[in-house]
Every structure is written in C-alpha cells, then in structure tokens.
Amino acid sequence: MVLKMIIVYIALVLYFTVDAIAAEIYERKGYTRLKGALWGLIPVYGLIHVLRARDIKIYQKTALSKFYAPKEILMKLLTFAELVLVAVIVIVPVIYMIGSSFAAQTGLPTTFWPKTLTLNNYTKLFNETKFPVWFKNTLTIAILNTIIGVVFITGAAYVFSRFKFKGKKIGLITILVLQVFPGFMGLIAMFTLFEVFGLLGKPTALTILYVGGAVPFNLWLIKGYLQQIPKDLDESAMLDGANKMQIFFKIIMPLSVPILSFVAVSMFMSPWMDYMLPRFLLDVNVSGGAENIQEQWTLAVGLFEMISGADKQNYTTFAAGSMIVAAPITILYMVFQRFLIQGITAGATKG
Amino acid sequence: MKGKLKHILKAIASGFIWGLGQVFNRQYLKAAFFFLFFALLIGIELGSSKLLTGYDPYQEQLPGEDFGENLAKSFYETYVYDKNNKHVAEIPTLEVFYEEHRADGFTNEELIDFTAQDILAGSRTKYYVFSEYIKATNKEIDRDSDLYPEEDGNEIAKLKSFNGYQTTYLNEETGNQYIQKNIGTGTDVIYRYININDENDVLTKEEIIGFPVLKKENKIYSDKLTATKFYIEVKKNDSIVYYENICNAQDKILVDDFVQANYSSLPKYKGSIWYSPTEKVYVYFNPEISGYNATPFSKYLTKYFTEFYSKAAGRFDQTDYARFKLRVYFSMHPETKADFEERFDNFYYNRAGFFLKGFWSVITLGTTDSADYYQISRLTEALDSSNFGGTIIENIIVRGHLSSYLLIKGLIAILLLMYFLIIYIWSIRDAYKTSLEYEQTQVHVKDTVYFKKMYESSFEYILLLPAIFTITFISIMPIIFSFLIAFTSYSGQASDVGLFDWVGFKNFTRIFVFAGDIPFGQTFWRVFSWTIIWAVFSTATVFFGGFFQAVIINSERVPLKKFWRTLLILPWAIPAIITQMVFANIFNENGVINAFLERIGLYDVFKSWGILGVQFSELTSNWQRAFYLGYDNIQWFTNSFNPWFVRITLIIVNIWLGFPYYMALMTGIMVGIDKSLYEAADIDGAGKQQKFKYITFPLVMYSTAPLLVMSFSGNFNNFGMIYFVTQGGAGAGDISKAYAGDTDILISWMYSLTVKYKNYNMASVFAILIFLIIGSLAAWNYSRTKAFKED
C-alpha cells in the first residue's frame, strides 16, 4: 500500500520535472514557454518533439547543456517534489469530502474514496432532512442582506469620502472601534431585544444584524474606493449646475460599480457561513415542538447539527449537504480570485 | 445688555416648549418643525404611560377575566328566589350583609368581601377534640370544647404533638424507644438516638446496635364505643407486633389481643394530632395549612357559578375561577393583598411612560420577583370548581420584573432620548441665533430659505441619518448592554427569567481569584496565554507558509504557474466553515486518517513504541508520556493527556486553511514587482539569493506587513477554527476547569459560557478584555496607515 503511494508520487514528480525541462528547452529554441510546457505534458512524445523542434532563434548549443546540469535538475526535482506534495495535501481532504457525499454507508467513512458509490445521500438530504428549508431561509437572508446593505452603506460611505464635517474623525474612529468588537458580544443583547420585539425564531430578522454588522467594514471599503475618484469630477459637475444628489446618482454610483459588486457579493456570502448568530437566535421554540425548530435554521446550523448532534449517523448526508453549499461558492471564488483578494486586502491595508 | 436679554428669553422659551422661541422670531414653519418633535416626545411618553388610561393591577397582572358586572346583583336575586322556593336554606349572614350594602347597589367587590368573611368564619384555627369530631355528623362546626389559640393558650401549651410516621429503635429491656436525629452541621452528618420520652437519654450509633427497628406508618384506630382511645399500628420487620396508645407508649395491645371488631379506622380529618397529659386527643386544624372548609354559603355560591357558567355557555373557565378565588383570598388576608399591590403596582414599572421607566430600569434593574400565589389551593374545598370542567388550577404565577428586558428597554429609551436632546438643543440655539441675526440684519429669514440652506449645508448629516440611527440601536446598544452586563450578576437560568443586580467590579476581581467553586482565575490566564500563542503562531506559520509557497511557484523553474496557483488556492475557495467541520471528521478517532495510518502499518510502529494502545496510567517512561497518542486510536483532538499535541495539530491544520490566501496575495505582489529592479541587480552581479534578500523579500513584506496585525486580530478571535474542529478540546464543559477545554481560546470559551452555561456576566468581562487588547492593537495599526494621516 505504502509502496504504491510512493511510486505514484515519484512518478508525478518526475513527470513534472521533465515537463519543466521541456518547457525551458522549447523556450530556448525561440518558442513561448507556455507552449513548451503544454507539449511537455504529453508523456514521452512531448520531450521528443521538443528536442526535435526546429530552432527559431539562434543560440549557442552549449547553452542547452545548462539545462542538463545535475544541480539544476536536482533543484527542479526538489521544487516539484514540494509542489506535488503540497498539492496532494491540499487535494486529499477535498476528494474525501466529495467522495463521502457519494458513500453508501451512514457512519464515518474511513477510506478516502468510498468503495461503493451511491446517490442516496443526496436524495436523503432532500427528503429526510430539512435541507431545502434551510437553503430557502439562508437564500432569503442573503438576498435581503445584499439589497438593504448596499443601499444603506453606499450613501453613508459617500458622505464620509466626500465631505468634511464636524465629527467626521470621531465617526471614523467609532466605526473602526465597532469593527473590533467580537461579532457576538451583542448576542445576549440581541437575544433579549429580539425577544422583546417578538423577532426570535424568524430568520429574516437576522438581516438586521448582518447589515448592522457589515456596516463598519464595508463602509471603510467603499469610502476608500470613492476617495480615489477624483474630486475634479464633482467640481466640474457642480460648475455645470448639478446639486449633490445628482452628483451622487449620476456620477459616483456608476463609477463605483466594481467595489459595489464586491460588497454585494461579500454581503451575499456572509449569511451562508455564519453559525453563531443563527444558532443562538433561531434555536428558540416559538411555535410547535422540536420538529418545527429546525424549520427556522439556516444552513450552517443545520449542517453542524448533522455531525455534532446526538446521533452521529449523518456524516455522509452532511457531506452531501456541504457539497451542495460549497460547490457554487468555491467556483465563484476560484473564478473571481484576483478580484476578491484585492478587495479584501484593500479593506485591510488602505483603510 | 438689554438686547442680549431678548435673545436669551427667546432661547429659554424654546427651552420650555420647543418651537416657542421660533414663534417669537416669526418663523412659524420652523416653530412647527420643532414643536412636532416636542409633541412626539411627549406623545410617546404619555402614550406609553398609564397616566391617562389608568392602571389596574388586577386587570393587568392576573390571568382570566372577572365574572361579569352584574354578577352580584343577579346572584342575590337568584338567592332570594331559591330561598322562597325552598331550594336552599336561609343564609342569615348574607341577608344582613346585603341589607347593609344595598344602598348603592350590591357590587362584585362586596360579594367577594362577604364570601371572604363567610369562609373565614367557617374555618377557625383551633384544636378540636377528636372524639367529638368522629362522633359528630356535622363535623366542621365550632364546638364548645374547641381550644382557640387566642383564648386557651394555657391549655394548648400543655399539648404534645404526635407524629404518626416514626421509625424507632427499641430497647427491649427497658421498653424505651429511641428516635434518630442529626446533630451535625452543614455537610457533616452525625446521628444520635434520643429517647422519645426523655430528651436527656441519648445514645450513639454503637449503642443502638442490636436494637430492633419499629415502624409506625400512621395507621391509627379508635375504639368504636367512645372514640376516646387511639391506637397506632407498630410493625417490626414488616409484621405487626402490637398496637400502641398514641398518648402513652406504655399502653400496648399485643396483636393477638387486638380485637379488630372493637376498633375502627379513622375518618378523614384535616390537621395534625396532639394530645393532652390527660390523654385527651385533639386535632390541630389550621386552614392555612389544611385548606378552608366549605360553608353552606360557599356551596351555594359554587352551585350558582356552575349554573351561571353553563348558562354563559362555557365563556368562563377554570382560569377565571382561579382568579375569583384569588380575589376572595386577598379579601380574607389583607396583608397578602397589600403585598400584591406593592409588588405589582410599582409606579415606574407599571404606570410611567417609556422614558421615565427607562431611567428607572437602568438604575434599579427591576425590584420585584415573580410571585406564586399557591394560596388559592387552600380554597379548593371551599370554592369547589370541579363541575366547571377542565383541571382545577392550584396556583397563579404573576410574573415579576425581568432585569434583562428592563436593561435593554432602558438603554433604548436613553439612546432615543439623546436624539431628542439633540433636537432640543438645536431648537434653543436656533432661537437665540436667529433672534440675534434679526437684530443685526433687520431681516426675517424666510423659513423656506432657511430649510433650503440647511439642507444644502447639512446634506451629509441627512444622508447619514438612517445609517447612524440604525447603527445606534443595532451595533452600539448591544455593545453598551454587554459592557454593562459585566458589572452585574446576570448568570444562570434564574437571572434569565428574573432579577439580577449591579455588582460593580466584583466580576473583574474574580479573574484574579484562584480558588472558589468555578476557578475563573486560573482558567482565564490559561486560556488567555493559549489564545496569544495561538494567534501568534497561526498568523506566523500561515504568513510564512504562504510566502514560501509563493516563492516556489514564482520561481523560474516552474512553468504553468497559473495551474499550480489555481490548484493550491482550493482551501481558501471552499467556505471555511465547511472545511473546518470536515477536518473535525477527518481527524476523528474513528476517522479516515487513523484508518489510513492503521492500514499502512504506522499503528504497529506506534504500538511498539508504547505510545499507542495502552492506558496512560500504565506508561512508565516520561518519553512515552510526552508523546502519548491514545488508547484505541490516535486521539488527534481529544487527547486529554497531551494538550500540546492537540494544539500543535490544530496549528498545522490551520496552515492548510490559511496559506492559500497569502500565497495568492504575495504571488500577485511579486508579479507586480518592476522587472527592471531585477535587471539592475543582475548587472550589478547579484546572485539569486541576494536578489531575493534585498528585492523580493523587503517589497513583499512592506506591502503585506499591515496585514499581519489584522491577521493576528482575526486569529485571536478565530471562533470557527477552535469550535468546529475541536469543540474546545478535551475538558470542555468541565466545571472544574471553568468550562474551558484544552484548545479553547477566549472567544470560543465566551461562546460556550454564554450559550451553554448561561454565565453571561463573566463572558462579558472577557469580551471587554478582548476588546481592550484587540482594540488598542487595531487603533495603533490604523493610526500608522497613510489614510488616517491624510484625513
């Protein structure tokens, strides 16, 4: 067993090393490196093709030998050894997750890929647990969150970025300070508040909290972005006779679509992954018995209950649920990675 | 000076009634504006108060409804009718009472008062002679032989009480019986055995050995003829041995001599048995203990209710009847009534308006606990409602003040008041300024112009207003609330539904107390130091891990960089909460990693080293103990003997989760570094290492170092990682460790304290401390950023 793994590993490392060498040779000959790398991916033929390719550029033959130097090859081997290892470590849990969602057993799967595959877990997810309800709840919250949040915060951010007014610095510091509080410090207060106004157990009421909690960070972000829009635009518009409202809607808003989309996306994402707030505020018996409590949950709460509840038989169903939730978000993140990382960093550093 | 006076007067006028000063300034629109808010404020206060509508504690606090306005009148009419038709015997006291009160109509209150009077009369506290009771047909009436506490104190003092349930130890030689008594204090239990006839005769446990045990189970018989002699059954080893005279333990009838036919068992009676030195047996009857007797009037009243109830077709039920009983009881015992009114007719709580009540709430946190009026169960017999249908209600619980609600509502009131205060000050200042302006320019600024100008100049405030208003109540109010909780005694189930008080800084001192039943002191420092270590190491490992990975991917040797980057960014792309839960599964004792390790044979290796498969207590060498892995399986996150093993595992798992973000970030930065820098370095003859050390590393660090601080704060509060992956680690929930597990950080501990163990005040204390630390860090970090200085 171990032997098998080691052989596969070494094979992969060699494979990639050869590919790197092929890419470099190809580049030397005058083609693009990328093409060389792609050719190199074809196991044996690739290398041969590359070696036999016509030279486009003139170069010294001896320059090629640099690539065959033992030290160089060793470094390549080590590099790819590390990369492949890390890649394996990264991928294995993911594969385990995907695999267990198709596993035929109910207990904790003990192999990385299940022996028997089945779609049962998915059907069980939709028929036996309250997954669709949770999904609907969370989706509602997310949509409400996005709309209300963007509308609210943009206006305020505009003011902070464009105007000097008394109390601006204080306001900024307050917002910074608010950001620091652990999100759930207001949990008890919120619980009592919700109880007083009869909002306990209503998922949509959580929107209030999410919007309130998102204000500091996103205000910051949008403000920073808006500050980069040159003030000359405002001034020339005012010369043309526009009042402040018009400037806001006709000039500022369209220009800030990128950052607004980022904020909208992140506000849409946040309720899916939040556990603490819904667990505390939605787990209250408002109507009916234990059955009905589950109707009020959001996804994060429901999923966690599956693996930490009294009966630990639901691992595979949990995996199926996680797949459904994680897949779209993961794809989204992968596609927009650059955009998202920039956004998060901007919020943190530029301030 | 006189000029100034005019302005000041106008300002004061606005101070009293908002907008009045503006009227004097002839700015009517503005006056209306301010006055609107004033009206709103007064309106809220009065509207939410009970000053206008009146407050009746009986209506508001007691459940059920009263039995209708004309109850008393129609009742009396029915009584008269029934009396005339001989359906019911005459009730003279009722008629006398009616005559006294008929002047302004016979009201429900008067009916209640009479009922109370009548029931009290029917059940006096007394000692009655048992034999007469047994022989009488009408058992409940007062007799001449009754002893009343007010009148016959001397005789009562001579009585001794009799306990029908006894276990005694018999000294067969002397015939003395000894009863067990605990003379220890608190948790120490010391038993002594006292002679029931002689208090000074005390024996110890050793001396009792061998004494047979006698049991009396309250089976008492009286002789059929006179009913003056009472014998109780005495059992030894579950079989009857003799019958003992309850007045005189020496008078025994052996079981064989006992003629059952001559004795009858006792009828139902209410109260406890006492006996005099002359062997006369009494029963002590106290209606407050045993319940009030039914009287002819009460029986008739109940009958009337049942018919009335059936006529009203089920509109009234047991709840309403219980309410009636309580009102009767209040009439019977005015001191209970006074207590009720004092508790539930609090001016500030029940009658004052929103703002006034808010201030009172924050200062006092409520004064009345819930009250349980179980006393109505004593009227169950007197006012028998069993024909009403449904279950008879034995007690009424009236909810008291809930400190948590009060605090929140109080805070809301105060915050709201602040907003009104702003407008108030605005109105005063405006009256003064406009008056001044008018004097100087002789121009009355038109209202519309004023508003337009205000709109333009305060555009920003107007736009901010909804956001500020919302944040005040959603973000600021909860924070203030949690902050204040740290200074109260809000903890446990009782406080959740009842009262708690201000305790000042006491909770903070508990951090430094290292003893007591819940060791917050010790645990706090342990958790705190682990939190810091965790934050530092998790941030550093992830940062440099990502950096390292970025460098490798970015090196010239690697083609297809995009492929590798996209692949390795996977852990970041998958939502963290899911991967955390999945890791909890993977590293489960019965999970896939352990199964895998077992399959490839590492288990055997570990077992041969002695760090797996044995009980911890059996290990001998220290080395084995330090690396102890588990018993059946490797306990990754539940190893209670090796907390550092768990913690290090956690940090390593965290690297998996965290490095992709930094990797991607730094790759982006590295790609953006100006290539000419490298070319210049090449010209200067720099080697690869030097290029890295002097160009790449500094540039990347400069751009991302600010993130380190933010990352530190984030990890300091990284709830998900700890809670989902380890649930706090071994020992979580253990009260001797103040509920904190091995891997708990401050925030996950706070969460458990709040949600599971309801220890709200301590959780708030920790929250405040976290805030102080992270807050100052963030403030310091922020103050260094360019943006702040520019602003």
Image (cartoon, coloured by chain):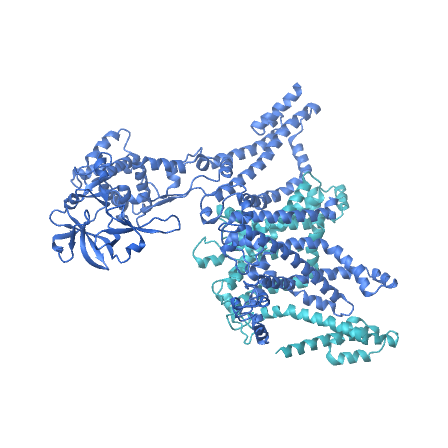
How many numbered circles are shown?
A: 0
Taking A54 as reference, is B662 above or below it? above
Find residue A77 and report its horizontal and vertical position in percent.
74, 73
Residue A336 appears in view: no
Of residues A109 and B320, the one nearer the viewer is A109
Residue nearest the viewer, comparing B470 with B262: B262
Q: With respect to residue B13, does A112 lie above or below? A: below
**Residue A333, percent from left and from top:** 65, 62
Query: Which chain's colour is cyan?
Result: A
Is A207 left or right of B395, judged from the image as shown? right
**Residue B497 visible in the picture:** yes
Q: In the displayed structure, would residue B223 be above or below residue B417?
A: below
- Residue A248, image x, y percentages: 69, 46
Along the horizontal axis of the image, is A110 left or right of B115? right
Nearer-the-camera pick, A172 or B126: B126
What percent of the width, then of the height, locates residue B162? 23, 47
As drawn, the residue found furthest toward the top would be: B2
Which quadrant, please, contains the C terminus of chain B?
top right
Give the farthest residue toward the left: B225
Which quadrant, please, contains the N terminus of chain B? top right
Chain letter corresponding to the colour blue:
B
Whether residue B285 sits left or right of residue A344 in the image: it is: left
